Amino acid sequence: MALLLRGGQVLRGQPPALAAADVLVEGERIAAVGANLPRPDGAEAIDAAGCLVLPGLVNAHTHGHNNLLRGLAGRWTLEDLLNHGPALNAGRTPDDHYLSAAIGAVEMAKTGCTTAYDLFMSLPYPSLDEMEAVVRAYTDVGLRVVLAPAVADLRFWDTVPGVLGLLPPELARQLEGLRPPATGELLRLGEESIRRFHGAASGRIRLALAPTIPTQCTDEFLAGCARQAREHGVGIHTHLAESKLQAIAAMRRWGRTAVTRLAELGILGPGFVGAHAVWLTDDDIARLADAGAAISHNPASNLRLGSGIAAVREMLDRGVTVALGCDGSMSSDNQDMFEAMRLAGLVGNVRFPHHTARWLEKADVWRMATANGARALGLDGQVGAIEPGRQADLALLRAGSTYLTPRSDVLGSLVYVETGASVDTVLVGGRVVVREGRVLTVDEDKLRDRAQAAADRLRARNASGFALADSLAPYLADACRAAAKTPYPVNRYAVPVA
């Protein structure tokens, strides 16, 4: 099938600039870009006049399971969120996982995002039926995704310095039943998931491995993931030094940073993505750059959870590939990559008062959401730009919308002004997924009704889990505040910790 997008303003080149052009799509790929392209026999024409034609955005870190119960998070740190994990995620059916992933995929599609890296979680760990449901959700909506079952073989509670000693006996007993899965089971899950689902949906679904947080994983499991990644040629994605607590836990366990330990275990390399990377040292940044690894910057959740402000300027200067993610909707509230771009362009400025040359340029942020995201997901040269031979993953935005008019500088408008509300049409692999702001591939209204019913049922079912998390929260806060006072080579908070 061929499509011809006529008369749009196409954003391409370095530095990116708009030019009037047509885009010819043949099958899944862009065949040509240029003025007044002839329409092949039988090709469908899409009128792109009055639209900006952009490469689809790349969300380099999200969690599909978060969408079903979003909006519940209060004044939670990352550790509070993990404390509430059983309450948020227990008792889900494969259909619940389908609904959660599908409504997130719909939100991404409607805001111009065509590709995501989804670290999908379930309790105690994802089953193959649940994996199949998430694969089906992305397939039905039509997005491109790298899907990684996020798992750990150590308990969160055993990684928080000092917290178990603070708990009253009755609370400690309630945690005894929360045992992690066996290392071998998780390695078998990774193996079988890759064999069964990698390359599904005509290649739009790819699998990766996600030892979710290094300090929640045994060295045996981390080394096993490294081995599987090499054997199958897939990526590894983990939450890396997201909070100071994680950085302190790594030092107490290994006597060195998580980055150093991952390097020793053979995990770092061009296929590695570390999410957040807030508490990296200068040596960590250099090690990641030298390994060809990538970082997914998630400014919304870093702020929402109070984790800190990542040293993105230093990473870019050192040559680290920095992509951009929304993170899950429990910690960032939405899947809008335009909001993620705006926050990424702003949050680091306070680190360099009156040294504006150190602030991120809008072009830096745009690369993070497009070309750098493609590189982080192992899709360099496939998505992230509008060029012949690339996948036809495109977003058409109404140029006359409230957010894009007047438009003095296209990247300034896209990075700092646009909200995703201007998105009109979205193509993924040459298939029209959104037209006139409406998803064509699934029934949005029925999907939302089913998701609301599932969310209501899960909140009621897991009421005791929320009560337990609330009982544990004061002791967790005391332990985390104590750990936060531990000296560390860098400070990523807005103020010194006293």
Image: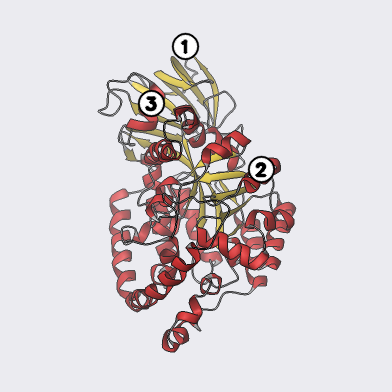
In three-dimensional space, the C-alpha distance between marks 2 and 3, rounded to whole angstroms, equals 30 Å
Residue holding disc 3: 412
Residue holding disc 2: 286
Amino acid identity at mark 3 = Gly
Give the mark nearer the N terminus: 1 vs 2.
Answer: 1
Q: Is residue 249 left or right of residue 171?
A: right
For the residues carrying marks 1 and 2, which lies nearer the camera in this image? 2
For the residues carrying marks 2 and 3, which lies nearer the camera in this image? 2
Give the mark nearer the N terminus: 2 vs 3.
Answer: 2
Q: Position of residue 101 (x, y in %)?
A: 43, 55
Q: Residue at x 51, y 36 (%)?
A: 368
Q: Label 1 crowding class (10 Å Cα cut-off): few <14, some 14-19, many 20+?
A: some
For label 1, the SS is loop
Give the mark nearer the N terminus: 1 vs 3.
Answer: 1
Q: Position of residue 342 (x, y in %)?
A: 38, 37
Q: Position of residue 304 (x, y in %)?
A: 37, 53
Residue 35, numbered label: 1
Instruction: Report which quarter residue 181 is drawn in.
Output: bottom right
Q: Is residue 240 above or below residue 41?
A: below
Q: Is residue 73 left or right of residue 27?
A: left
For label 3, the SS is helix
In the rendered image, the residue lying farthest to the top is 36
Q: Residue at x 65, y 53 (%)?
A: 259
In the rendered image, the residue lying farthest to the left is 402
Q: Are marks 1 and 3 in contact (CB under 8 Å)?
A: no
Instruction: Report which quarter residue 69 is drawn in.
Output: bottom left
The residue nearer to you, when weighing 207 against 210, is 210
In three-dimensional space, the C-alpha distance between marks 1 and 3, rounded to whole angstroms, equals 25 Å
Q: Label 3 crowding class (10 Å Cα cut-off): few <14, some 14-19, many 20+?
A: some
Instruction: Report which quarter residue 389 is drawn in.
Output: top right
Amino acid identity at mark 2 = Ala
